[in-house]
Amino acid sequence: MTSSRGPILLYALPLVAVVVLGISTMVQTGGEPVRSAWVLGGPTDSDGPFRGRVQLKAESLGAPSSLSGETIVLEAIQNDHRVQRKVQTDATGWAEFELPLRASSTIHLRVMDQVGTILAEGKPFLETARWALSARRRGGKAPRHEQGPLSARIEIEKRVLAVPFEAHGEVVVWYNEKRASGVQVELRAAGMDLTNAVRGRTDERGRFPFSARPQEHVASLDVTVEHEGRRLRFDQLLPVVPGAYGFVQDEDGIVVIAPVPREEGWFTFVREDERLAGGRIVLKETETGQSTGRIPKEIVPSREDLYLVLASTADGRSPSTVGYPLQGQAQTFDALDAYLLDGAPLAQHRAEKKRRKIRWALGGYVGVVGVLTLVLFVVRVRRADKKLRSSLRQVGATQTTSDDSPLPLLIAVVCLFFAFSAGVLWIVAR
């Protein structure tokens, strides 16, 4: 019984080691996805709640992907003040959040999954003044053109134009520094189509309204003003934002329009000192080749000096992002959520630490198997050699018939040793 177990173990141990190596290679090659979170948000020092959006993502073999329908726990700590909120990711892995915090204290933010694994952690900080200063501003009041006592200026309702959405504007006329009514105004457009009267007179407030639909990314308006024998003519370039989303307000909320077929859009309501609600809009293609979606009325904040930031991506890092004024402000306020936390480095470090432990454990296992195999091999060879010598003596063979050189055994042992050593080094070095 003892003699039969030796060969079985001698064959089985290396075979088991090879199988374990193969399985570990397959598992590590497939790669367990590394999960982490990415946090974007507005100012952290304002008196109102801290608002932003968070994305849950996974990376496998260097390819990132978003995780939808997952529950994320956000925990914020400010000294003895602790608040926790649960949010669920949408189809793109993003979720909006709001945390009622104290403006004067440093925030320690922790993002976790349902089982408590930390996906991102740190102390996000963004000053309101810095956030407002980094916002791009476009449009504004055009320069005032003058010819003697007669002067005029063009004003665009949304401050910028976007192809191919209809925009509304006015030509405002002054005579002797007073708003002039009944003044003859004539318009000619380049790079856009005028969709209402191109000739008429100003109203009692000295305004001549017009509507235009830009067709190109460079548009201008040629204006001729005549009053009491005086004539003023000027040409004004109008601000056009390539690729920008448009919108129309109605009693049920805001309809967002993409100029080309798209599946989604992103919106954020902001003021110049505060980030408010935001989210993702699901867009559907229309017969005109555009895509539309709706922001419900109940989501629109009832606040003064409100802007609507529309973007094609969640982070808004695109030249087409525009923060439209909703209450007549002089310019756009293209404010973006700041990159506040990225849990990917922490997750990668944690995953690499885990892989290192597995490699060392696997290397130790193969090393032990190698030592046992060597011991069994030497024992087996010596036992066979002893049996051979006994058989030779029984048949009367002389001592010189057998080879007493230890070199073959030594070579076999060294070969086994280097074979298992190579396996251990390969595992640990991966």
Image (tube, rainbow, N blue to C red):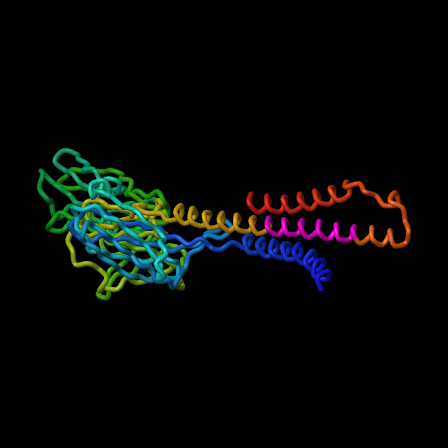
**Among all residues in the image, which is located at the extreme right?**
396
Measuring from the top left, give residue 259's x and y in whole percent.
37, 54
Q: Main secondary structure of the magenta part?
A: helix
Compared across the picture, whether 290 is left or right of 200 comes to right
Residue range highlighted in magenta: 367-386
- Front residue of 229/423: it is 423
- Front residue of 281/15: it is 15
Q: Residue at x 74, y 50 (%)?
A: 382
From the viewer's perspective, is residue 54 above or below residue 188?
below
**Among all residues in the image, which is located at the extreme top?**
148
Measuring from the top left, give residue 398's x and y in whole percent.
89, 46
Measuring from the top left, give residue 253's x and y in whole percent.
24, 63
From the viewer's perspective, is residue 174 above or below residue 387?
above
Q: Residue at x 64, y 57 (%)?
A: 16
- For residue 333, say whether it is visible: yes
**Among all residues in the image, which is located at the extreme bottom?**
252
